[in-house]
Image: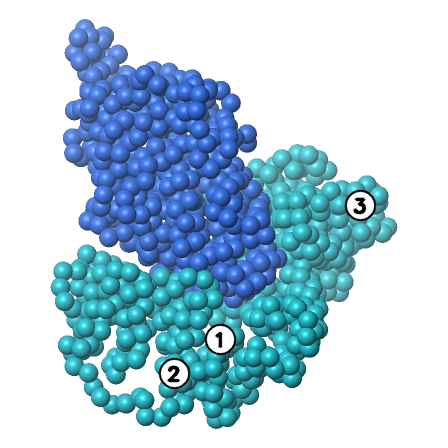
Amino acid sequence: MKGFSMGSLSLSRPLLMGALLSAGAALGLSDDARAEADRDPIRVGILHSLSGTMAISESTLKDEMLMLIEQQNERGGLLGRQLEPVVVDPASDWPLFAEQARDLLSGDDRVDVIFGNWTSASRKAVLPVVEELNGLLFYPVQYEGEESSDNIFYTGAAPNQQAIPAVEYLREQGVERWALVGTDYVYPRTTNKILEAWLKDQGVSDDDIMVNYTPFGHSDWQSIVSSIASFGGQGKKTAVISTINGDANVPFYRELANQGISASDIPVMAFSVGEQELTGIDTAPLVGHMAAWNYFMSVDSDANFDFIDSWLAYKGDDSAVTNDPMEAHYIGFNMWVEAVKKAGTPEVDAVRDAIIGVTVPNLSGGSSAMMPNHHITKPVMIGEIQNDGQFSVVWQTPSNIAGDAWSDYLPDSRNLISDWRAPLHCGRLNVASMTCEDGEPAVSQ
Amino acid sequence: MSRRAIRDLWRAGVVLVLVMLALPGVVHAGDQISDEQARTLLEGLDASGFEAKGEAVERIASSQATQRERWLQALLEGRLARERRGEHFYIITDDAGREWPIIDAITLEDAGTGSRRTINTITINNTLRTRIEGALAAMSLTAGDVSARLAAARALLGTLDEASAPGVEDTLADEEDPAVREQLETALALYRVQQGDVAALETLRGHLDTRVRNALVPLAEGDGELAGEARRVLAGIERKREWHQRVQTLFFGLSAGSILVLAAIGLAITFGVMGVINMAHGELIMLGAYSAWWLQQLLPGQPGLALLLAIPFGFLVAAAFGIAIERSVIRFLKGRPLETLLATFGVSLILQQLVRTVFSPLNRAVAAPEWLRGSWQVTEALSISYSRLAVLIFCLVVFAALWAVMRFTRLGLEVRAVTQNRDMARAMGVRAARVDMLTFGLGAGVAGLAGVALSQITNVGPNLGQNYIVDSFLVVVFGGVGNLWGTLVAGMTLGVLNQVLQPWVGAVLAKIVVLVGVILFIQKRPQGLFPPRGRVS
């Protein structure tokens, strides 16, 4: 019951503070107490699953946030105030995410900002809550797009910052046939819809595209891998675009190796496999399979080396790894810190206005900026799996790509943009009719 | 670059060497190159584009540098590095940890250590990797290793042209290994067919390599003797492939079925004998898998031994937990199935969280021993992976052992007596409570065995059991509660059905179809495939 004890631990401090304050008031020190309130810690909510299926990915992000907050406090905090983490455990349960977001955002103990979520399903659950209670959420994972909220900042990749460049790269490498293989839920389905539309735009015929979905945690890949092998054995260069999520990847790659399919026969380009996921696999048979991200642990930059050093020291584990969502949180946290400094207050409305245009260094040696559509600019990289479970970067966009909330390749969202600056202040602006369409999302899920 | 073009590059290297072999006097051996020349060669590898690096690889492959094999091997493994702000090239001898021991790439002398901050490894991509492998294969072809020659000969299929064919013919004349000869003959036959030689088609008849098929498809179009004959050969190949595919699907099904049987068979015992709906059954499987992992941690470097030891150990661990659950929870809820269900569900959550707290929520890697890796390539179109084959055999062995226990031991006799008529058995002096405990322990232990086997197939993590619990109940209910043979037949049937359906309708729909099928079947025969006989209900 790790999550529970942490939740109660974080609650105890404000209680203690409250007790001190009321004690102070009783002694007739109310003026000082009010001044004290300004020096109250700024509260940072961390909404990541520490138990359940997603704990494998999300618990790392919780640790990273604690490290970033600790480092910020060592530098003297923010606006002269300390940062205080409030950790909760939504236990990989989507409705529980919404409930706990509500707890974090209501009452006297409300947090000033939330860093959290991993799956799109959990984000969709939290979205109405942060909008209703006017919270701030930083979402660090690559996702399917087709969404924009005044209260959410998307620091992970939108499809145009990951999927499309990756497929473009494979086309350059001569791939003519495409197997789109994914887990059966909103992110793979929307991403594959965008990719299919894009590929057909480029003149790829229906016969050269194969789409396959499997349930969460699928572990018996024998016949699917064998049908991919026969799909790829028709004399045209074939690649697999994998949006397989989480656990199911290990048996998938194992089956590829078992059936003797190497990266030079049919390369796999994955959008959900990072360094963390590879820690459970013997990577020798996977060398050459690819992943597309905005950051790899192997990136050559001093900022990255420093980040890795402090992460290993924080974890006390020389074999700990970093990954792309960690970089997203790193960028998101620093952007929020800069925005609070700029606004002079952690107040939600002020920070939200201040953060657009804020630019902070990222870990790949450049810097990322917050765009008016609440997405950020990042480089896109293709990495190939190495023997040691790391990726080596084989291709990188020459410059940063700005995230696009609404895909240009889906007919429903082609004309939509998002711009949260005044005076537009709209998440779904139809540029053809210049009207703001609020309400239902463009892609029905 | 198309897949064909990449393969061609691979083969071009091989063919080049073959041609050189056919023209004695082209290769001068023995001329050492200077350190300066060596550095120039290596500098070519530090180019920015992969195309340029590929050219540098070819320069190295055709150079006289004595270190060329080491360089290319290191480059292939990502161990060739350049000093970050300097001139030196290094080979990393061990890339574990953060400070790597390095040697100078040119002098091959010890050069201390390097880290990511001081040296820069030279990256390669897939295309380049294929080129390097081709170059290395071609080099070892001259060295005369059989497996390397075989790989090189296999790569020749479909790439021969006027320039290289005579060289291959000469190589074939000198070649003694039958496997290599066969590959070379096939490659030559395909070349001759492409030149219009109808007789050569005979060699290709029934050849299962997809490259032969893909090369014949364009030839089979149109009329004429060659096209007609090619069509016949192609039809034969397709028929043969289809049969191989069917055998492969059957094996996939049996393999998937064996996993279902392993997971369900322990449940068949507890559910059948005691009528206990044990929702923690999946977690007992997980504990078996974790004991395999734990033994591997205790015996580093000996994954095979650890796995063998894990078979009795996993059984004991899971059995101990099973008995503990029976003693502390289940026996107090006798005859109250709904409460048992809820209580064991609670136990399953507790066990999951226990594992999460003790071992972390991350998945654990259970290494596959050398003898379980890879697959047995029966023919070009049919391969059977060793790990799956081992699990299938293990499943049958466990089944046979369990059957023997139930049939021939005193415990088995008592269990059967209690199953058939509890009160009568007690009246005859069978201590039913003890039988319950031992039965539950046995069922749990078998779940532990399933976990050990599953550690070779799937993820070992806290959620392992959840993926199998529903399927296990499905198998037991379908097979007939409490019937071992029913469980075996039901598990295998569902496995094969699933694998046959998956390529047609996809994994999600296949699952639904199987589930609906089982529900309809149960409507017709509520007692499952093999209804229990003589049971008082």
* Residue B334 seen in render: yes
**Marks 1 and 3: CB-CB under 8 Å?**
no
- Gap between marks 3 and 2, in whole Å? 64 Å
Q: Quadrant of residue A49?
A: top left
Name the quadrant of the C terminus of chain A: top right
Alpha-carbon neighbours of circle 1 within 10 Å: few (<14), some, or many (≥20)?
some
Which three-letter amino acid code belongs to the residue tagged 2? Val
The chain holding disc 2 is B
Q: CA distance from mark 1 to mark 2?
A: 14 Å
Q: Position of residue A81 (x, y in %)?
A: 19, 24
Left-right relation of A112 to B243? left
- Which chain shows up in cyan? B
Cβ atoms under marks 1 and 2 closer than 8 Å: no
Q: Which mark is residue B521?
A: 3
Instruction: Give coordinates of residue A225: x percent, y percent.
Output: 57, 58
Q: Amino acid at mark 3?
A: Phe
Please identify the residue farthest to the left as the structure is shown.
B86
Of helix, strand and loop, which one carries label 3? helix
Tell me if residue A278 can be seen. no
Compared with B167, B48 (above or below) is above
Residue A14 or residue A355, whichever sits in front: A355
Drawing shade for chain A: blue
Badge 2 element: helix
3D distance between C-alphas at marks 1 and 3: 55 Å
Dots 1 and 3 on the same chain:
yes
Question: Which residue is painted at 34% across and 29% down in the image?
Answer: A374
Q: Which mark is residue B159?
A: 1
Q: Are marks 1 and 2 on the same chain?
A: yes
Q: Residues within 10 Å of mark 3 (few under 14, many from 20)?
A: some
Query: Mark 1 or 2, which is nearer the eye?
Result: 1
Q: Which residue has dot 2 on it?
A: B17
From the viewer's perspective, is residue A384 above or below residue B180? Answer: above
